[in-house]
Image (cartoon, rainbow, N blue to C red):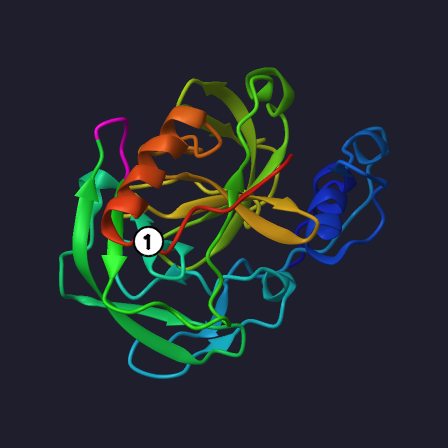
């Protein structure tokens, strides 16, 4: 049986991942044209990122809509998910960190496997996030995700924008930003949307990352702390970024966060 997603949501996701059908400007994708468009049916597809996941070898990526999403910087071989923020640094939920010296497995966009280990963890005081240092950097085909460049207007500008939310089962869902308060962000979803386009986060989803799409590329905006539609640290916050940057510098000053403008 098919399920359907209103064009308001589907057009934004399609445009973000493939560049189709939404007006662009110098500042990036505009929501205006898609938000004013009437409803139209779009077929449901699997939210799975992988068709066949293999932590001990190469994996097979799904060939649905999620294939457009670059998940090469997310380590899914443990429920204690790690997300790449430099070629040698990962970010995790502080209450759910990956133990030091356990395998951290990544798969690139062709499903090729790379394994690293965390050798140092910096538990930071500003929120539910920790920075881990890998034993070696990842090669260029594994993507460290940028963060949003800080801006004072995000609490009024970003609510209502769409985010791609991951979970412990290596899936991708579409939620919206509900609110931003300082260094925290909360999501929401429309309960009328069919399965596959919303996820009630549960125990074990902690630390999985969420992204906004800018010019077809994922930008890390949050890692899960709480359940339901999702809540966690807001990585576009200047104070949060400063603390993460300090941890990166203290562990390997050859690397730094990358940021992109909204």
Residue 92 appearing in the image? no
User: Image check: 184 left or right of 206?
Assistant: right
Where does residue 155 sit, x and y in percent of width and height? 55, 18
Q: Which residue is drawn at 57% across and 22% down?
A: 154
Where does residue 39 sit, x and y in percent of width and height? 82, 37
Q: Residue at x 60, y 66 (%)?
A: 67
Observer-nearest of 21 and 229: 21
Examine the rendered structure and indicate whether residue 127 appears above or below residue 81: above
Where does residue 26 sit, x and y in percent of width and height? 81, 38
Observer-nearest of 160 and 127: 127
Observer-nearest of 30 and 224: 30
Examine the rendered structure and indicate whether residue 131 appears above or below residue 116: above
Observer-nearest of 113 and 245: 245
User: Image check: 193 left or right of 24?
Assistant: left
The residue indicated by pointer 1 is: 90
Q: Residue at x 18, y 49 (%)?
A: 121
User: Image check: 202 left or right of 20?
Assistant: left
Judged by its main secondary structure, the magenta piece is loop
User: Image check: 18 left or right of 226?
Assistant: right
Residue 29 sits inside the magenta stretch: no
Examine the rendered structure and indicate whether residue 114 appears above or below residue 83: below
Give the magenta range. Answer: 125-129
Residue 6 appearing in the image? yes
Looking at the rendering, which quadrant does residue 234 occupy?
A: top left
Q: Which residue is drawn at 48% across and 73% down?
A: 108
Q: Quadrant of the C terminus?
A: top right
Where does residue 173 sit, x and y in percent of width and height? 53, 48
Looking at the rendering, which quadrant does residue 104 occupy?
A: bottom left
Mark 1 crowdedness (10 Å alpha carbons): few <14, some 14-19, many ≥20: many
């Amino acid at each position: 049986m098919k399920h359907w997603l209103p064009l308001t949501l589907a057009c934004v996701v399609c445009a973000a991942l493939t560049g189709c059908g939404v007006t662009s400007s110098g500042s990036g994708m505009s929501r205006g044209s898609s938000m004013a468009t009437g409803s139209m049916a779009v077929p449901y597809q699997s939210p799975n990122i992988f068709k066949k996941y293999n932590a001990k070898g190469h994996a097979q990526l799904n060939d649905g809509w999620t294939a457009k999403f670059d998940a090469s910087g997310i380590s899914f071989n443990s429920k204690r998910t790690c997300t790449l923020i430099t070629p040698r640094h990962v970010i995790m939920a502080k209450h759910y960190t990956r133990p030091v010296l356990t395998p951290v497995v990544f798969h690139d966009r062709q499903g090729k496997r790379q394994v690293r280990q965390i050798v140092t963890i910096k538990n930071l005081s500003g929120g539910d996030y920790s920075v881990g240092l890998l034993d070696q950097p990842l090669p260029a085909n594994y993507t460290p995700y940028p963060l949003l460049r800080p801006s004072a207007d995000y609490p009024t500008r970003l609510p209502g924008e769409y985010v791609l939310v991951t979970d412990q089962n290596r899936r991708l869902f579409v939620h919206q930003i509900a609110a931003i308060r300082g260094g925290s962000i909360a999501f929401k979803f429309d309960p009328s949307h069919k399965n596959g386009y919303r996820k009630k986060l549960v125990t074990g989803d902690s630390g999985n990352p969420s992204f906004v799409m800018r010019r077809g590329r994922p930008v890390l905006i949050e890692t899960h702390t709480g359940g339901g539609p999702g809540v966690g640290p807001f990585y576009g916050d200047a104070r949060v970024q400063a603390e993460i940057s300090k941890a990166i510098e203290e562990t390997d000053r050859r690397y730094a966060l990358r940021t992109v403008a909204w």
